Structure formats: structure tokens, C-alpha cells
Amino acid sequence: MRKRDVPLTGAELEKIAARYPTPFHVYDEKAIRENARAFYRAFSWVKGFKNYFAVKACPNPALLGILGEEGMGVDCSSLPELLLAERSGFSGEEIMFTSNDTPPHEFVEAARLGAVINLDDISHIDTLEQRAGIPEMISFRYNPGDLRGGNGIIGEPQEAKYGVPRDRIVEAYRLAREKGARRFGLHTMVASNELNESYFVETARMLFELAVKIQEETGIRVEFVNMGGGIGIPYRPEDGAVDLAQVSAGMQEFYRQTIVPSGLDPVRIVFECGRLITGPYGYLVSRVLHVTRKYKNYVGLDACMANLMRPGMYGAYHHISVPGKEGLSRDSIYDVTGSLCENNDKFAVNRPLPKIQPGDLLVIHDTGAHGHAMGFNYNGKLRSAELLLREDGSVRLIRRAETVDDYFSTLRFPGASVRV
Ligand SMILES: *Cc1c(COP(=O)(O)O)cnc(C)c1O
């Protein structure tokens, strides 16, 4: 199977690189908008369908603005993310606050914004009451424990730190109502980067059944179920994308079987997908500094794990294209590395590529989510710029690259000490 084509030619990338030195991430606005519309179309039967884009996946106001225009809200999990959402034009219930181990002052900020607060634990009801007051709307994150198998990145639910366990979930709603909540949501997230359609259908069924149970036992009507994020993308050329129509149809079937007869209809269905929304439409563009032969053959890039951590952290596959060498056979085997003093700083291991020369540009695919965002400064590495390829073909800088001054900006050198 062919990997999605890079939306820029080698010559175009060279022109961009002359203005914005490599490495950089570039995001394809047109593809992101089309993808957002397709997601909403797939769930057009749901009244009030919404995706709250997980800000952590790509926290850039340019992208958040585009997604806002496409009807999305945002899902935040920290104070800076809440403030970024506000600065990017989101307000009130367009903001979902799904956090865990939450510092109490972050609840205060979420309440000030009027965000939907999604509590990770029953004990947070008291914290919220004491610090911010109980808002009208409360949602809980549910952890089904051994009712569900987990998947690779997120692990087994009963090992997960997240969510209200099965034996306390009904009690959580009762308590929230006792303390003044009047509107309710129900959330779960039990998978990450999952490509199996039926997994999401089963998750929906689980939430629908739980919503019915909550109503039966407490009289509380859940007004939305939040499926969380976790819809995967085809990182490998042989992977298929999740068939959203199939997920949607499966969910609709269970909705008819559970929600409709219970009288709970209409229940809104919402997601917090990040990866699915921007992941495939971001590209890390990097230049080859060295091609070396040791016990293996190495391609050394000017990007490193600080620009894209997933391969080093999870052993994740990211496809690599070599603009201008698309027609050549991939008959050389390389490890593609960065310059960190860590041997897991590799974008690819034993990857067949066309013969590479120093100076070549490499394009690493699927970096539009959990790419730049996971960057760090270890080894004095600076985070790269982010660019937006606009619908008219122009390119806009949406985050400059970090400089050495940025790296120094939080340091306090000896001699400049202040008595405290
Ligand atoms: C990370 C996360 C998401 C987004 O996950 P994707 O894999 O990007 O879809 C959504 N909700 C919560 C609570 C998360 O932690």
C-alpha cells in the first residue's frame, strides 16, 4: 500500500527550508479541514455531535482556530492548556477539562471559564466544592476495570490511574447531585491509537448501558457520553484507517437498543480525539547531516527525539519519504538517527530507503499529533518551528523555532542571586 503523498514537492520544501531552516513541522490545513468535515459527516445522525480536540496533541492556536471554525471544541488537561484554549477563542462548554491528579487551582480556572469539568475521581467533588463551588454541569471519567481489555499505549484499565471505578460510579453521580450539580456527562477513555472499529462500538455500548443504569438507580439523566480520544491512524503503509462509518453505524445500533427504549434519547455523543484529527497531516522535515557506516548504516539528521519522541519512546513506526527519490528502489537499510546522546534517539531502525546522501531532505510522516508537542530540551536540544501550509499553497510560520536565549531564559546564574 502507498503512504499518503507529501503535499509538497522536494523543490517546494527546499524553498521553504531556505526561509525556515530545518528541522520543522509543517501542517496541511486543507487536509485537516477535509478530515474534520468527514469526521462530523460520519456522525451526522447524532444531535449535537462534537469533537473536543485534545489540545495536548498539537497545542498551537493556529490549528485550534481552524478546528474551532470546523465546529470543534477543545479538551484541556492543565492550566496552560485552558489559557491557550481561551486565547484561541474558546469559551464555556466548548472547553472540556479532562485532567487527572489535578492541582486544585486548575479546577478554579476551569470553573471561571465555564468549562465542562470531567472529574477523574470521586474525591475531587469535595475539592471542587471547596475551591470553586459545584458547577451546574459535572461529568465523570469512568474506569471499567476488568470489564474491558486495554491496548498497548494506555494499558489495562485495572492498572490505569484514571477514572472512577465501577463500584463507585453511581455513588459519584448521587454525591454530585446532592452537592448541587444539575446536568451530567459521562466519559471514558480506555484505548489509545486503536485501529479496531469494534473496540469503539463496544466502548459506546458500555457507556450507553451505564447511562441507563445511572438513570435507573438515581433518576439522573446523562446528557452526553464522551468517548474520549484514542482513535488510531495508519502509521504503517500496510495499516488501514479506522472506518468511521462502521464505528458510527455500530454505535447507532446500540443507541437504538439501549438509549432509545430507556427514554434517555437524545444523548449527545462526543469525542476528544487528537491524533485522528491532525496526526496524518503533519510532517517533520529534516536534513541529512551525515551518512555513516559502523556495524550498521546510519543516516544522521538535524532533527532528533526532541522533535518527535514517539519512535524512541514507544518504538513507534513513522513512515519516511525522501523527496526527489520517490521513484528509486528502497534497497539500502539504515537506522535514521538524531544527535541525542541516547541510543534510542532513532526515528527508524533497519529501514529500507533509497540510497541517502548528506544534504538530502527527509520527510517523517504523521507528526501532526503528539509530535512537536512532546518536545523537550534534554541535551540542550531546541524545539523546532511549526509551519502551516495554507489552502492557497502559501506557508505561514505558526511557531518560531526555539533559540539559545529561550533555553537560557529560565536559568538564574550565580551572582544574580536574590535573598528569599
Ligand atoms: C490523550 C487524550 C486524548 C487524545 O488522545 P488521541 O490519541 O490524540 O486521540 C483525549 N482525551 C484524554 C483524556 C487524553 O488523555
Image (tube, rainbow, N blue to C red):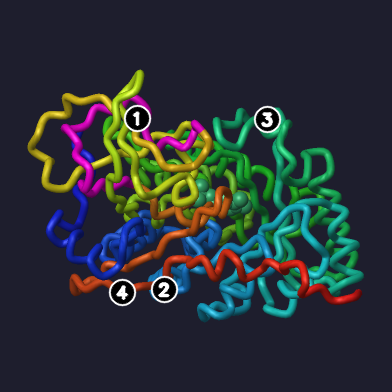
How far apart are the two marked residues, 4 and 2, measured between alpha carbons? Answer: 10 Å
Lower sequence index among marks 3 and 4: 3
Residue 147 disc label: 3
Give the mark toward the camera: 1 or 2: 1
Q: Is residue 227 visible?
A: no
Q: In what element is the residue under mark 2?
A: helix
Q: Which residue is mark 1?
A: 335
On-image quarter of the N terminus: top left
Give the vertical position of 385 relative to 257 (above or below).
below
Quick one: label 1, few (<14), some, or many (20+) residues within 10 Å?
some
In the image, the segment drawn in magenta is: 343-365
Q: Residue at x 53, y 35 (%)?
A: 342
Q: Residue furthest left?
A: 327
How far from the left and from the top, in percent, is residue 231? 46, 45
Secondary structure at badge 4 equals strand
Nearest to the observer: residue 163 or residue 85: 85
Label 3 within 8 A of ligand 1 by Cβ:
no
Q: Say if the magenta span includes residue 353.
A: yes
Earlier-in-chain disc, 1 versus 2: 2
Q: Which residue is mark 2?
A: 62
Q: Nearer the viewer, mark 3 or mark 1?
A: 1
Amino acid type at mark 3: Leu
Whether the residues at callouts 3 and 4 have beta carbons within 8 Å, the answer is no
